[in-house]
Image: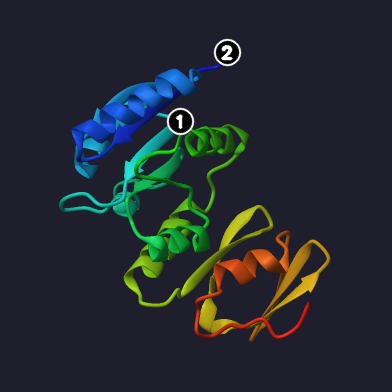
Amino acid sequence: MEKYKAIIIDDESSARSILEQLLNRFCPDIQVVGTGSNLMEGVEIIKAKEPHLVFLDVEMPKYAGYEITQFFDSIDFEIVFITAYDQYAIKAFEMSAVDYLLKPIDIDRLKSAVNKFKEKQTFTGMEKAFQALKSNLDNETFSRIIIPHQGQQKVIKTSEVIAFEASEAYTSIHLEDGKYMVSKNLKHFENLLEEHPRFFRSHKS
């Protein structure tokens, strides 16, 4: 069995301990090689241990978890954010295409996050995803959405979207200066944007 190195960064010692125990028991191919109590400590551990996967708390003293991009030229490891945020913030994670775990951690959700990590081939565009997450968390309405485009992550401002149009299992996103075809159905975007004041479902397609 291939082993993947992981690091846990969380300012709560009990949270670090519980997650490590869950990984040891339910995700045996994930090996925790270090833990940190704040972002700066975690950055040093990441540079020393070179993990494949980082479990990173969002809310910590001094630096928020998504500010990790300030300390690396590029992100060559997967990040799963850990959060106790409310439903608005959970939607912000989904809008930004960033994986997350809710506290208290659900075992099936943890297994799912680990499986998604193992299936992922590249980490390109993660910086854009984190920037979109920061924008979405900082604003009262969601201002950014991440979509996959030509193997990369593309940031789209919700203010520039004219319409989402269904095309069987795909969706065309019409912008002021063109459009993008995305391999997500219309219901996916309807759920993401159901509380956004700019959007409403006007037609079946």
- Colour scheme in the image? rainbow
Which of 69 and 61 lies nearest the eye of the viewer? 61
Classify the position of the C terminus by image quarter. bottom right
Q: In which quarter of the image is residue 143?
A: bottom left
Badge 2: residue crowd in 10 Å (few <14, some 14–19, many ≥20): few
Say which element carries label 1. Answer: loop
At which x and y percent is residue 5? 42, 24
Residue beneath disc 1: 52
Distance between the alpha carbons at the discs numbered 1 and 2: 15 Å
Looking at the picture, does residue 89 appear above or below residue 11? Answer: below
- In the image, is residue 132 above or below residue 3? below
In the picture, measured across the screen, residue 84 lies left or right of residue 165, that is: left
Q: Which residue is drawn at 70% across and 85% down?
A: 202
Which amino acid type is shown beneath numbered disc 2?
A: Met
Q: Is 201 situated left or right of 57 in this image? A: right
x then y, percent, for residue 46: 32, 33
Q: In this view, does 174 lie to the left or right of 191?
A: right
Above-or-below relation of 65 to 165: above
Q: Name the residue under label 2.
A: 1
Q: Residue at x 35, y 75 (%)?
A: 139
Measuring from the top left, give residue 61's x and y in whole percent: 16, 50
Which comes before the other along the chain, label 1 or label 2? Answer: 2
Which amino acid is tagged 1? His
